Amino acid sequence: MAGPAWARVFSAAAPGPTVPVMTTTAPHLLHVDSSIQGDRSVTRALSRRVVDGWLAANPGGSVNYRDLAASPPPHLGADAWDARFVPADQHSDAHAEAFALSRELIGEVEAADAIVLGLPLYNFGPPTSVKAWVDHLVFPGLSVKDDMSEGLLTGRRVIAVVARGGSYAEGTPRHGWDHAEQWLTHILSMVGLTPEFVATVAEVRPALAHLQPQAEASRAAAHSAIDKIWARAAA
Ligand SMILES: Cc1cc2nc3c(=O)[nH]c(=O)nc-3n(C[C@H](O)[C@H](O)[C@H](O)COP(=O)(O)O)c2cc1C
């Protein structure tokens, strides 16, 4: 590939229409978890609470669940990248497989009126499975215009519940070191989505037991914020 400009690379893609995965007109929600901490996970409990609230506000609504920790998408590799600009009728099997994965993941978002994402902070960033999921979602011609000028997934709410071990607020020693929320906001803006965040401090290690009251207050505030999310939508 002889170094074409970014926009020209993408304008050569011929991805065709995205295949919808749902045909129902009933409200539909995509629930995505990514915590590697199983039953101990804070974000899994919080995302469940958001989904339960949505189901209460949308009787008859349906939910599609994707567990990125149990079934992580592959890292974005060379074939997935090339599949974005090699014409579809010249796709190798590996291109076609990567293309199909992007269409599946984008189709799940397109089918949803709302998306709920559990977003733990690991090593100052999102879990790698979330990074891989988003890498496959950003696909010129499918989720963003070929010239990257406009996202194509607008019109759906994204609620991201964040849990982290410490505080990164202004005045704290690691202010600005939490790179999950800002990253998600920036990258989802490319596809036309604007995430809303509910964040909590997760757990307190025995050595930091004196911070337990703040952690509990933080969790209570998150619950309160979550319980208002769908009421706000209905207002
Ligand atoms: C692998 C790993 C890395 C972590 N890195 C950070 C970190 O960089 N900053 C932080 O504040 N907390 C960190 N934590 C604490 C998590 O943010 C906390 O456990 C939170 O509950 C994660 O969400 P979860 O319970 O849904 O997995 C880390 C936890 C794990 C397991």
Image (cartoon, rainbow, N blue to C red):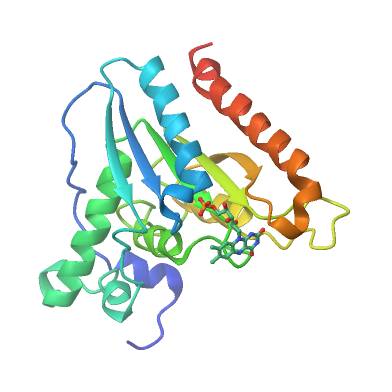
Q: Tell me which corner region of the image, top left, top right, bottom left or bottom right, holds residue 88.
A: bottom left
Residue occupying image coordinates x 68% and y 56%: 205
Against 167, residue 1 (above or below) is: below
Q: What is the x, y in percent for residue 4?
A: 40, 80
Q: Residue furthest top?
A: 235
Q: Quadrant of the N terminus?
A: bottom left
Against 158, residue 67 (above or below) is: below
Q: Is residue 183 left or right of residue 127?
A: right
Q: Quadrant of the C terminus?
A: top right
Which is nearer the eye, 4 or 157?
157
Q: Ligand 1 sits in which quadrant?
A: bottom right
Which is nearer the eye, 88 or 233?
233
Q: What is the x, y in percent for residue 178?
A: 67, 59
Q: Residue furthest bottom?
A: 2
Which is nearer the eye, 152 or 30?
30
Q: Tell me which corner region of the image, top left, top right, bottom left or bottom right, holds residue 65.
A: top left
Q: Is residue 127 left or right of residue 213?
A: left
Which is nearer the eye, 70 or 213?
213
Q: Is residue 213 left or right of residue 69?
A: right
Residue occupying image coordinates x 19% and y 49%: 17
* Residue 174 seen by the camera: yes
Q: What is the x, y in percent for residue 183?
A: 58, 58
* Residue 155 seen by the camera: no
Against 168, residue 86 (above or below) is: below
Q: What is the x, y in percent for residue 95?
A: 19, 73
